[in-house]
Image (cartoon, rainbow, N blue to C red):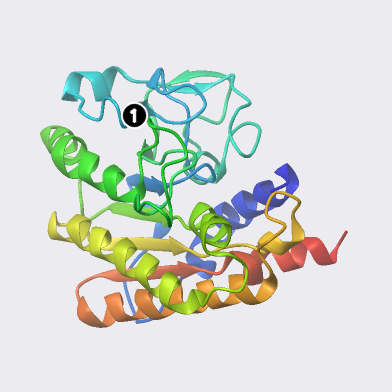
Amino acid sequence: MKLATLSSLCVALHAHATAILHAHKTCSFNWHTTQSLLAFGDSYTYIQGIHGHQNYSFIHDNLNLAFTPAQLFTNRIVQDFTGTAEGGPNWVEYLTHCGVEDGLHDPQNCDIQLWDFAYAGADVVEEAGMTPLHHNHTVTFARQVEQFVQYGNPALESIQLSKEDALVAVWIGINDINDLVGTQGRNASFAPLYAKVQDDVFKNVERVYELGYRNFLFMNLPSLDRGPGTPNVNTLLVEGFNRIHAEHADAFQREHFDATVLQFDVMTEVLRDWLGKQ
């Protein structure tokens, strides 16, 4: 994805946060009272940390998943770095204004704390013949949640992070949709495969919900067929993936009346507008 595209997304999210984070129910969520953002996903969302795997993560990797509270709280966001998918600060940094300027940044010193467990190159789960690991150090979305459940959440609880004022952001699927074309072939029946991907996503989101978090933001996939990096992913595949994703997010909302479920349509809200101006 081009830098200008993701920059447009970040600007839109921050400038119009309350308006465009559309919830499928009446809710009291207000971005401007949010105190922390907890992020999970892939290269679109990961940020670099001094304790992270270079070019891949904020903290550790699949070969060393565990960390102590001290390791988390001495970690710093690195912002003299150009290895992200965006070539610099990404959307979660722009949205929170945490780690945007050059240098090292302590998430606890940001007005909106940013705790990012995303890992570049992540699929939702590792499955041989379907979505294999890109590298042996890759942390899948399921493993990111496991890392958070085992190590991240206990550490954040130790500093009394308010779960009521936290937003959990999930943007995952770019690698899954591309890898499934590669492993299954372009003529495969993808709807059941995408349904399984989303089953796995929301099974893991449920684990975060069970920890007491109640505010969730889900991002769908952009127009991947417009970029050179995913030549085998066409518009119909993206639309099908996004439809199944939305169905699962809606179902999660119906099953959790005390949760706020926000869905951001990346393609409709930002990318088509931006591409239409080029």
Q: Which percent across, then down, holds residue 23?
A: 41, 75
* Kind of element beneath mark 1: loop
Q: Which residue is mark 1?
A: 61
Q: Which percent across, then down, holds residue 233?
A: 65, 64
Q: Quadrant of residue 234?
A: bottom right
Q: Reply above or below: 190 against 218.
A: below
Q: Which percent across, then down, holds residue 96?
A: 47, 42
Which of the two residues, 255 or 32, is positioned nearer the viewer here?
255
Q: Quadrant of residue 116?
A: top left
Number of residues whose C-alpha sits closer than 10 Å to that of mark 1, classed few (under 14), some (14–19) or many (20 or more): many
Q: What's under tag 1, amino acid-wise?
A: Asp
Q: Reply above or below: 226 against 109.
A: below
Q: Reply above or below: 145 against 103.
A: below
**Is residue 115 toward the left or the right of residue 6 in the image?**
left
Task: Determine the residue positioned at 35% across, 70% down.
Answer: 196
Which of the two residues, 38 or 235, is positioned nearer the viewer here?
235
